[in-house]
């Protein structure tokens, strides 16, 4: 009887190397930092990366998965090209960011639990305080690598439309602006 051997793909081999490097010398107490480093590398936590983390660190898969799903900062699905993060810190929440989040979903045509647009240009996330509460309510836009970041203050429905239009145009032009941070404050 013939045996079939399935060889790992180039991507799987690369991931094995990446996770090996990230988990080298890491112990259980480093699990959050390890997950952060993997997410920084891939933009999210692929299922295979969770399996490798568990294997390399000797931590059970349910524990790795439990930590990855407990914290809002971790993504288990690939994000859109631009990630719109809506601050849900106390100051921003009090100034209307829960409504902004819902309005954003409507503007992007996201239904139910859907967080990524069909064309994969945008994904949305509820985020923690960005530390610029005086500009509340605040929304930040990053790209999937986290190298591009722009923060918008005093956000209302008009600003949300502007954010979407601006980044849709960038996506169409395939623009990237690495390591740039701008505060745009829309005073009323
Ligand atoms: S509460 Fe939103 S930036 Fe601080």
Image (spheres, rainbow, N blue to C red):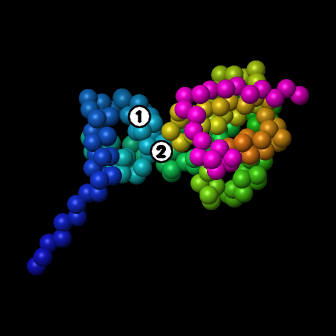
Location of the N terminus by quadrant is: bottom left
Q: Earlier in the sequence, mark 1 or mark 2?
A: 1
86 in relation to 105, above or below: above
**Residue range (magenta):** 168-188
Q: Is residue 55 left or right of residue 161?
A: left
Q: Residue furthest left?
A: 1
Q: Which residue carries the number 1 mark?
A: 37
The answer to whether residue 136 is seen in the rendering is no
Write down the residue under mark 2. 44
Bin the neighbour count of mark 1 within 10 Å (Cα to Cα): few under 14, some 14-19, many 20 and up: some
Q: Which residue shows up at 41% across the image and 34% down it?
A: 37
Q: Are marks 1 and 2 in contact (CB under 8 Å)?
A: no
SS label for mark 2: loop
Q: Position of residue 33 (x, y in %)?
A: 41, 30
Foreground: 174 or 6?
174
Q: Is residue 127 left or right of residue 138?
A: left
Outermost residue on the right side: it is 188
């Amino acid at each position: 009887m013939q045996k079939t051997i399935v060889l790992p793909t180039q991507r799987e081999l690369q991931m094995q190397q990446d996770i090996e490097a990230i988990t080298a010398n890491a112990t259980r107490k480093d699990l959050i930092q390890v997950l952060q480093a993997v997410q920084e590398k891939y933009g999210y936590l692929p299922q295979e990366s969770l399996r490798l983390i568990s294997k390399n660190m000797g931590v059970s898969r349910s524990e790795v998965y439990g930590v990855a799903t407990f914290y809002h900062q971790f993504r288990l699905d690939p994000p859109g090209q631009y990630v719109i993060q809506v601050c849900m810190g106390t100051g921003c929440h009090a100034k209307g960011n829960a409504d902004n989040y819902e309005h954003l979903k409507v503007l992007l045509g996201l239904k139910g639990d859907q967080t990524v647009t069909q064309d994969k240009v945008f994904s949305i996330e509820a985020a923690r305080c960005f530390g610029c509460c005086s500009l509340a309510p605040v929304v930040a836009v990053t790209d999937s690598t986290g190298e591009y970041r722009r923060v918008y203050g005093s956000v209302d429905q008009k600003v949300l439309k502007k954010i979407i239009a601006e980044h849709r145009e960038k996506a169409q032009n395939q623009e990237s602006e690495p390591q740039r941070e701008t505060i745009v404050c829309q005073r009323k």
